[in-house]
Image: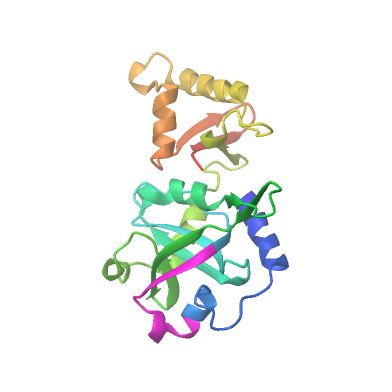
Amino acid sequence: MNGPLLLVAAALAALTPNARKGDPFAADTWRATPAQFEGKPVKTAVLGLEEPGLVASDAPVAAVRILSGNEKDEAGGAIIVLLPPAKFQAFVANFSARQLGSNRGGFGALSKAKVVAGTFVTVNGEGALLYELDAKAAKELAKPSELLAAQLRTADPTRPGWTRKEFNLAKLGALGAPETTREWERLQALLLAKAGKDKSQRRKASELIAAAKAGEPTRIDDEAAKVEWVLVWR
């Protein structure tokens, strides 16, 4: 599933100058000298995120591929971040946006990439960045690329001929965002119609938002448009 995050990451990779070899902020440097960085704390600027997909309820960890770099916006290679599933939504939301800082010239604000700190480890031959995960437990995991591939498969529609779309509740009502209040009300009506007279299946808007924030996406089927909507918080 190709989304806006993937397009942004690809554009950044094409336009961003490369970090010098040996830059400690670059993922390529960690992989090139694993003896120096294996199991050690590292940090890098997040210049972009690729499409993360959706985390299954029984997934042992979540995976997000980032474009690493230094604070000069020089790219240092892509790497997969492994993190607890409960942290997935907040991580994607936080690192999808750049950090605003003061402009010394006095004209507006400057933006810079946010920095993530973690532990560099090699999992089944693939270098990865652990975020709030224990390095010993990570050794029992599948390859990071396989974990990410599973998330992308989860994001595919489950019914042939249908399309899966995300409704980002974090952007509800934001200027220019497709997540309008009217569309949100329509999706809730679809969910209510599906529940019918079964009150146990009815969910309040606050419950749906809380579930999305907790990384528990809710699926809403739009039979007329053949669209599987997934409520997320990013």
Q: Count the numbered circles shown.
A: 0
- Locate residue 187: give its quadrant: top right
In the picture as drawn, the residue positioned furthest to the left comes out as: 136
Q: Residue at x 29, y 65 (%)?
A: 134
Q: Residue at x 42, y 64 (%)?
A: 117
Is 190 placed above or below 70 here? above
108 vs 173, left or right, is right
In the picture as drawn, the residue positioned furthest to the top comes out as: 197
Visual colour scheme: rainbow
- Locate residue 39: give its quadrant: bottom left
As for residue 83 lying within the magenta part, the answer is no
As for residue 36 lying within the magenta part, the answer is yes
Range of residues picked out in magenta:
31-45
**Quick one: 208 or 90, which is closer to the camera?**
90
Q: Whole-percent x and y of residue 170?
A: 52, 36
Q: Whole-percent x and y of residue 50?
A: 58, 58
Q: Is residue 1 visible?
A: no
Q: Is residue 158 visible?
A: yes
**Quick one: 178 or 193, which is closer to the camera?**
178
**Quick one: 51 or 76, which is closer to the camera?**
76
**Quick one: 147 or 95, which is closer to the camera?**
95
Q: Whole-percent x and y of residue 48?
A: 59, 59
Q: Residue at x 71, y 67 (%)?
A: 14
Q: Whole-percent x and y of residue 228?
A: 55, 36
